[in-house]
Amino acid sequence: MANKEHALLSASGAEKWFNCTPSARLEENFPETTSEYAEEGRLAHAVVELVNKKYFTKMKKSEYEKQLKPLQEHGLYHADMLNYAEGFRDFIKEEANSVKNPTLLFEQRLDCSTYIPESFGTGDVIIIGDDTIKIIDYKYGKGVLVEATDNLQLLIYALGAYDTFNLIYDFKAITATIYQPRLDNIASTESDVNTLLDWADTVLTPRAKLAFDGAGEYKPGDHCRFCRARASCRARAEENLKLQEYDYSFPDLLSLDEIADILKISDRLKNWVTDIEAYALEEALRGNKITGFKVVEGRSNRQYVDREAIEKILLEKGYQDHEIWSKKLHGIGEMENLLTRQIFDELLGPYISKPPGAPTLVLETDKRPEYSNAVEDFKNVDT
């Protein structure tokens, strides 16, 4: 599970450098960081890789269990990782069976340097059969639904796979799929090879050259959340500070169109402030003075040091178990992880309800159906 080397213009980071071409070189000034979510994703991919090896390479059960054990002992492991991996394995089997004489490749290194300077990536699963390449990417995260259509990472992987194997196969079409089990998201898109190659020549390669040279214009956007320079980037700051043009007036002094403009950037603004706060704290802890601020010890809560010793003392003093212990059912998420999702659904599904969520204002591009307000729907109906 060691971190793999990364290209400056990696496929996984394409949303950043394609949309904001100078960002790739700017990021070189900042150290690479990780997070618990990233480590969890790496662990989930390691489980997937092992499950696929067991089935598709006929790995011995003893060897499989030997390699699985340290993964299961990892602090971020939970049972659903294995369930999701096995579901992904079954999906791969179905996809492979959909073409004649399939060739399956796992964790395949893809050279993308024909289109992007010094670029390479690793495809989770590649299936070659008939005149088609199938690119399948496993996404374990559940914070953001990942789309397949116009997905730059998948398009670049498709180009890398085509470049690697086109001398052997006569490809006509490329299918790219996102498999995101924790959001029940399986999304695919298909392109003919000529269309993909034309896009690479006319759009991707010129953008990649700008990015490799550190040229072009900074363009703040949702992709900033993945950038290592996000906290101190001046272009992002200037974009977010445009909110000042409203002079932070009360909503009832603004038109609905003005409110809509503010709402469109509000999430981006919140994320920017959070990034700034984290960056400032990090710098202050390094000894760099942030004018007007200081680092203090935050609030904390008392905690037991030795629960067994506390229990023994209280029982010796005559307190009863029910007086010193509380008993309650695990939460739904914790229970689902304990039982595994399939068993949870089989045993407890009839006893679980999910009430309607509270109305939430989102962009029109959100795929959820529009909220129906019964009061508004019927207020003009004659009775």
Image (cartoon, grey):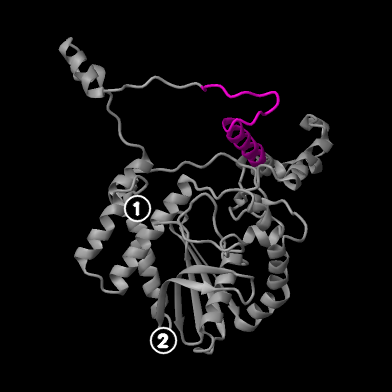
Residue drawn at x 68%, y 53% is 26
Q: Which residues are magenta?
A: 270-298
Label annotation for residue 100? 2
Q: Residues within 10 Å of mark 1 (few under 14, many from 20)?
A: some
What is the quadrant of the N terminus in the image? bottom left
Would residue 176 appear left or right of 82 to someone viewing this image? right
Kindly state the secondary structure of the residue where label 1 is placed. helix
Of residue 35 and residue 177, the one placed in the foreground of this image is: 35
What x and y, as percent, mark residue 117? 64, 70
Type of amino acid at the residue the image marks with label 2 = Lys
Residue drawn at x 54%, y 86% is 166
What x and y, as percent, mark residue 337? 33, 46
Q: Which residue is mark 1?
A: 80
Kindly state the secondary structure of the residue where label 2 is placed. loop
What x and y, as percent, mark residue 227? 62, 51
Query: Does residue 292 lie above or below 220 as drawn?
Result: above
Query: Does residue 100 lie above or below 4 as drawn?
Result: below
